[in-house]
Image (spheres, helix red, strand yellow):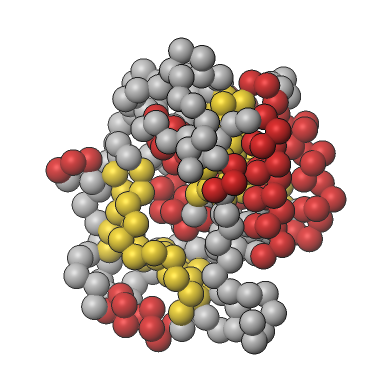
Amino acid sequence: MNSNPQDGTSVKKYGLALHTASRELGLAISNFVGDSRCQTWNLDRDLAIHLHQYLVEFIQPQTWADLAFIAVAKGPGGFTGTRMGMVTARTLAQQLDIPVFAVSTLAAVAWAEPPQPPLAKGGLLSPEPSLAKGGLLNTEPPQPPLAKGGLLSAEPFLAKGGLLNTEPPQPPLAKGGLLRDDIALQMPAQRGQLFGAVYSINSNSGVIELFPETVMTPESWQEKLDNWGNSYQLIEVGSELGWSVSSVLELAYLEWQMGSRPDWSDALPFYGQHPVKGH
């Protein structure tokens, strides 16, 4: 459902992203022409106490009226945190009458991870995001570089349509803007299982889902990888993911540029498992 009308002449300036699906709270905001910032806080179980306060403080000097859309990490991740972020994003978007883009936690990590040489079967890559002082994200391609103070560079990183003018250097691409290797991600789930997904990355349209995020046994996931037809990078996703909030925002903006305006009511969390065993 796309209930919000598209009007390129009256687009508001900023997108806001929330990532609450892990022990870290991640917030990012950008107008996509140079004024951008992101920050993380390791709140663990105190997310419910501090989320509203940090969100209100973070958005300043912008106001809610400056927002064109909201992006939110939809999971997989912690049940309570994921639900809290989704409820917050949906409530704000409903009140402001703006779209909500629900972005996969695993897709955001895939988008943030720089391309690596393809791995033999069974190998792992562990993403280690580099942080600037104060916990601000230092970006790696395909993210834009950070300027002094942790702000995203005034050099915009997307071009076609919408608000941006130039593209940053990208890794070597195959035909159609596709990076050459698939990206497989695995993330611990409850009760000895894990979440697995496989994506390809397109510099023009974002992540392409090749195998949807699925909860399974480690044996089933390994069998899936053993039978995967293409070379791939395998990334072990950790428990602190607020740093990838800038990727959540970038992927949402790519969809915005392509004309998508998802209604707040269509933004749903992905839990994959019930938090209580047996359900």
Residues 177 and 6: in front is 6
Q: State the image coordinates of residue 275 (x, y, percent, origin top left).
A: 67, 75
Q: Is 278 on the left or on the right of 259, as rendered?
A: right
Does 190 appear above or below 41?
A: below
Does 201 appear above or below 224?
A: above
Asked whether residue 4 is in view, the answer is yes
Q: State the image coordinates of residue 141 (x, y, percent, origin top left).
A: 38, 40
Quarter occupied by residue 239: bottom right
Quarter occupied by residue 54: top right
Does 110 appear above or below 93?
A: below
What residue sits 46% from the left and 83% below the top?
Answer: 217
How many numbered dots are placed on residues in this image?
A: 0
Q: Is 177 on the left or on the right of 263, as rendered?
A: left
Q: State the image coordinates of residue 85 (x, y, percent, origin top left).
A: 67, 50
Q: In what quadrant of the picture does the C terminus appear?
A: bottom right
What residue sits 48% from the left and 74% below the top?
Answer: 215
Q: State the image coordinates of residue 91 (x, y, percent, origin top left).
A: 70, 41
Quarter occupied by residue 38: top right
What residue sits 53% from the left and 23% below the top?
Answer: 31
Residues 115 and 212: in front is 212
